[in-house]
Amino acid sequence: MAWYLFLLAVAGGVAFSIWNYRRKAAASGAASKARFEKMFKGQAAAGAASDVPVISRPEAATRATPMAQAAASISPPRERFLGQSETLIYYLLKTGVPDHEVFANTTLALVVGAPGNGRDREQQVRRLSQYQLDFVICDKSMRVVAVVDVESAAGAGTAGDQSFKSGILRQAGIRVVRVSPAALPRREQVRALIIGEPQQKDG
């Protein structure tokens, strides 16, 4: 009987030791899990905060892009693309050579080719681009046949530019016609001035 009680006491001690060990292990595991979750949440929050770009609103508002600056400096559109006298000449040319195309306000660089190559050619193109042509007359295949230069009120002040443009155009084989708003040719004279052909009469 005593032996049986001894075995029972030993078995009870072993069971208590196992239970106590499991209880402590569970408590330690729960504490470790809580610390891990707390640490993970803190790192996740810090990482999320570092991934979000911080924009300084005052700096972004005061720093304007070149495009925004250019847009702010653009003036409203002109009331007319052509003035009254230029509009009159445009329609005179359109009716005088109806089988041709008339273009207004182009540049010398768009009509004649620039010699050279590389940087030299770029400089020539920039130079030719500074000279404006009032009207360019093209045939239906868009070949330039004539340039119409409108005499301005400045007159002598632009004599050098007129001479330069005329020289370049004639070297390129392009007819140059000068007209004065104060003495415009008649409609039936326009064709002969532009392409050297008389106006064909109906019938």
Image (cartoon, helix red, strand yellow):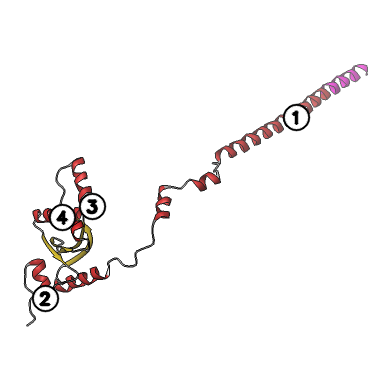
Q: Quadrant of residue 17?
A: top right
Left or right, residue 28 beside residue 11: left
Q: Secondary structure at mark 4?
A: helix
Q: Secondary structure at mark 3?
A: loop
Instruction: Specify the amino acid type for callout 2.
Output: Glu
Label 2 crowd bin: few (<14), some (14–19), many (20+), radius 10 Å: some
Going 22% across and 72% down the picture, which residue do you hit?
88
Left or right, residue 101 beside residue 196: right
Q: CA distance from mark 1 to mark 3?
A: 88 Å
Instruction: Report the disc number at residue 26.
Output: 1
Q: CA distance from mark 4 to mark 3?
A: 11 Å
Closest to the camera, between mark 1 and mark 3, is 3
- Residue 30: horizontal and vertical position, in percent? 73, 32
Q: Main secondary structure of the magenta part?
A: helix
Instruction: Specify the amino acid type for callout 4.
Output: Lys
Instruction: Specify the amino acid type for callout 1.
Output: Ala
- Would you name the residue on which mark 3 appears? 130
- Would you name the residue on which mark 2 appears? 188
Q: CA distance from mark 3 to mark 2?
A: 33 Å
Instruction: Specify the amino acid type for callout 3.
Output: Gln
- Precedes in sequence: disc 1 or disc 2: 1
- Precedes in sequence: disc 3 or disc 2: 3
Q: Give the quarter of the figure containing the N terminus.
A: top right
**What stretch of residues is rendered in magenta?**
1-14
Going 91% across and 20% down the picture, which residue do you hit?
5
Closest to the camera, between mark 1 and mark 4, is 4
Instruction: Report the disc number at residue 141.
Output: none
